[in-house]
Image: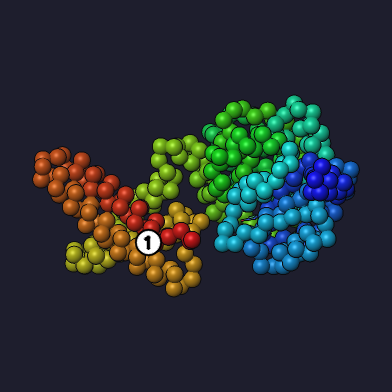
Amino acid sequence: MDDLSAAVASAPAVRAPPELTIVVPTFNERDNIRPLLGLIAKALKGDSYEVVFVDDDSQDGTLQELQSVARSDPAVRYIHRIGRRGLSSAVVEGMLSSSAPYLAVIDADLQHDETLLPDMLAVLRGGKADVVVGSRYVEGGGMGEWDASRQFISRTATRIAKLIIRAELTDPMSGFFMLTREAFAGAMRNLSGQGYKILLDIFASHSSTLRLRELPYEFRTRQHGESKLDALVTWEYLMLVADKLFGRLIPVRFLMFLIVGGLGVFVHFGVLTLLLKGLNADFQASTIIATISAMTFNFFLNNLLTYRDRRLKGIWRITKGLFSFYVVCSLGAVANVGVATALFDRDYVWWGAGLAGVLVGSVWNYAATSLFTWRQKK
Ligand code: GDD
Ligand code: MN
């Protein structure tokens, strides 16, 4: 035996590698970190686990808190992401950073019932399920203090989820679950990673049917900090569903861009009607104003929805973006008119020529604005 292997052989095992990695996405959760760790420790005493926080550059002191606990507790790690946002993608990164055979996700805000963790682990160890989900909708579970409208939204979203998954999940919106490494590995390359609904994403992305167990829990009320769910989360959810439904045929972002463009047509004609009929304005001038209004409308809507993840913020970046959008779309209009006229001159039916023009213009606008207006950060 050489020196090195002798040293390795005689070194004491400082700590066993964890059997379970618990991924906790955080965004401004400073006051929840320590209480959560305390509760998990109490629930899982005797089990070997680690906790991996994935934080998207919180500015409320969460990171200082994470660093301080990670320095004193070897079972705690964290990933600090900069310039990124997203619950699902955070969870995916946390899971990818782990080598444990079992992986769990739990919210940082103490709304999920951590006392379920040992039961979840027991089910997976038993080998009869690939995923164990904490559900609010099976017998014994509950919504906690959600008001009627949020309950309605959640139930509707659950119905929509049936479009993309076959599994009998009662609570596909749940952000509280545990799964085997193999189950995660089977889905990880196809994940959409968009938005909030990582469990749904995993089920929709897995090549085979996952064996499922659901355990009831009661959703708790948040004590510290606030929810990060805003109105646009609904939007991101619909995008995830659309991506899973026909993302293979046509990129959802392009589809989105087309829909926004379609709405722009209405803005164009609205403004045109107003100026012509309401103010008796000159046709050419009205058309110019209508065109600029529609482009401006499209820019802001795309910035809010289509490019939500690369959203331009701040007056300077928005102004710059808006002008590059004007330039690109004007060139798109030239291409549109050029193609349509050329085809029309070759005796194509008028609407066919028109449609071809619109398509060429849209593809150009989409490609060029994604390069110039909403350029991906390096
Ligand atoms: N890293 C990261 N990045 N974490 C985030 C982000 C983000 O962009 N947005 C939210 N989080 C973290 C929060 O800090 C919290 O720990 C957890 O994700 C859930 O966020 P909340 O804002 O508290 O969500 P909620 O309470 O409205 O919804 C929760 O319950 C639903 C019902 O079960 C989430 O867990 C949902 O996924 C779940 O569907
Ligand atoms: Mn919450």
User: Is residue 207 rendered to the left or right of residue 338?
Assistant: right
* Coordinates of residue 96 in the picture (x, y in percent): 65, 46
| Mark 1 lies on residue | 372
Residue 58's quadrant in the figure?
bottom right
- Looking at this view, is 248 or 200 the one in front? 248
- Looking at this view, is 291 or 81 the one in front? 81
* Coordinates of residue 21 in the picture (x, y in percent): 75, 45
* Coordinates of residue 87 in the picture (x, y in percent): 62, 51
Q: Amino acid at mark 1?
A: Phe
Is residue 108 shown above or below 238?
below
Residue at x 48% of width, y 41% of height:
243
Residue at x 59% of width, y 28% of height:
208
Is residue 258 shown above or below 139?
below
Element carrying mark 1 = helix
User: Is residue 317 rendered to the left or right of residue 14?
Assistant: left
Residue at x 78% of width, y 59% of height:
70
Residue 293's quadrant in the figure?
bottom left
User: Is residue 130 rendered to the left or right of residue 40?
Assistant: left
Q: Residues within 10 Å of mark 1 (few under 14, many from 20)?
A: few
Quadrant containing the N terminus is: top right
Residue with the most extreme front position: 2
Residue 223's quadrant in the figure?
bottom right
User: Is residue 55 rendered to the left or right of residue 165?
Assistant: right
Instruction: Report the coloring of the rendering.
Output: rainbow
**Whether residue 159 is visible:** no
**Whether residue 182 is visible:** yes
* Coordinates of residue 314 in the picture (x, y in percent): 49, 71
Q: Mark 1 vs ligand 1: CB under 8 Å?
A: no
- Looking at this view, is 111 or 221 the one in front? 111
